[in-house]
Structures are given as structure tokens and as C-alpha cells.
Image (cartoon, rainbow, N blue to C red):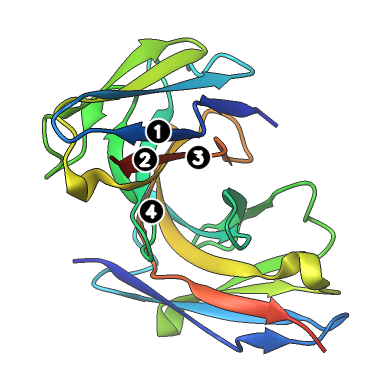
Amino acid sequence: EIVMTQTPLSLSVTPGQSASISCKSSESLLHSDGKTYLYWYLQKPGQSPQLLIYEVSKRFSGVPDRFSGSGSGTDFTLKISRVEAEDVGVYYCMQSIQLPYSFGQGTKLEIK
Amino acid sequence: QVQLQESGPGLVKPSQTLSLTCTVSGASIRTGGYFWSWIRQHPGKGLEWIGYIYYSGNTYYKPSLKSRVTISVDTSNNQFSLKLSSVTAADTAVYYCARGSVLEWFGELLPWGQGTLVTVSS
């Protein structure tokens, strides 16, 4: 099973500032089809996870452009520029290149 | 708009079998290019993928749970189900169902149901 490791596990950010979350996988997430199967989800309090980013850097429909994903191979980053109060919750990275799917431990974002 | 809704008992006794159903609306479970998945989240913890089923009945289970898990599909009622046998307190979790895409390869889990809390206790 691919192990996904996120850092930090918690973040406290002033509104308007930026935040960055790292996700490292124990194996490369680059498939022979040329795609990299790395996703970012946000789980807001009391809700189910919602998709933010797919295939490393593609924003899902309706996701503000304040959210951006980058990385390759085994190292990935989610950046949130100009953090807003509505961004609070737990962020998870997820891989699907190898079954079983696996998730990072989650990064809790709080607003100062 | 595709929606998924979990249902089932919220309380299960130790050693018994946990049974949940996910009802899909807004799309046919027979639609190609998608699989139907279960994920759980222990209280205050992260996400654990349990397994999936394709409409044809093909399944995959997380190896560590494989001996206790059965996922089945009922295409006539547009539902799929999870059974987890011999449960213990460690199986207490919020259980989510989700649709997964499988085009060129396995893809995103989207959408998710709202989740249902199952507590294992006598």
C-alpha cells in the first residue's frame, strides 16, 4: 500500500495570508499513461470530503483559483493564497495509482 | 446531479455483522466508467478506503479488511451495499459511500454521501 505523508498536520493562518501543505508518497504516482494520480480534498466541519484538485494541479469545477496544486513523482504541494474563513477544515491528499486508494493523515487549517 | 445516501443501523453489537446500503440517485449504477466505493473515518481520524464494486459485480477490497468485507450491488434498485463481519469497537466509524471514476485508470472519488456513523457497542 502506498503511504501518503502530509505536513504539517495543523496550520493556523491569518485571513488574507497564504498556506501551503505538503504531501509525499512512498512511491511515484506517475502512471504510464502520463497522468499523475494525486488528488486534494477538503473536509469542512461536519461535512463529507469535497474534491478540490485532481491530477496534481487541475482545479475541480467551482473551486476558487486561490487553490493551486503542484508537484510531481512523489512530492506534491497544495497552496492556498489569500486564505478565507470558509477555507477552514481538514485537507487530505489521496492517491489512486495503486489499489487500495490511500489518503494522507490530513492537515487541519484554522483561522487566527 | 448524482447523489449518494448511506443507510443502515447506527449501532451494531461486537462480533456481529455491520450492514450498510448506499442508494444512488441522479445516475444509473450501471453507467460504465464508474465504480462504487466505501470509505470510513474513525472518530476524529483520517480516511480509510475499504473497497469498491463495479456494476458487473467485480470487486476489490483493501487487503487488511478483505477477510471481513463484502460489497454487493443491486442494479435493479440502484444501490450497493457493505457488509463487515465480526466487528469490534475498532470498526466504530463514519462510513461513506462514493462514486469513483475509472476511465483510463482509477480516478477521483466524487461525489460522496453525507456519511453515517456506526457505533460498535454492546
| Residue located at (81% from left, 65% from top) | B68
Separation of marks 3 and 4 at Cα, in angstroms: 11 Å
Q: Single out the mark in the foreground, 2 or 4.
A: 2
**Residue marked by disc 1:** A11
Pointer 3: residues within 10 angstroms few (<14), some, or many (20+)? many
The percent position of residue A38, horizontal first and vertical second, equals: 42, 27
- Dots 1, 3 in contact, CB < 8 A: no
Q: What number is the disc on residue B85?
A: none
Do discs 1 and 3 belong to a common subunit?
yes
- In the rendered structure, the answer to whether residue B17 lies left or right of residue A34 reads right
- Decide which of A4, A13 is in the foreground and name it: A13
The percent position of residue B117, horizontal first and vertical second, equals: 56, 76
Separation of marks 1 and 4 at Cα, in angstroms: 18 Å
What is the chain letter for disc 2? A
Separation of marks 1 and 3 at Cα, in angstroms: 11 Å
Q: What number is the disc on residue A49?
A: 4
**Residue marked by disc 3:** A106
| Residue located at (11% from left, 45% from top) | A62
Q: What secondary structure is found at the residue carrying circle 3?
A: loop
The percent position of residue B73, horizontal first and vertical second, equals: 54, 72
Q: Mark 1 or mark 3: name the one nearer the start of the chain.
A: 1
**Residue marked by disc 2:** A109
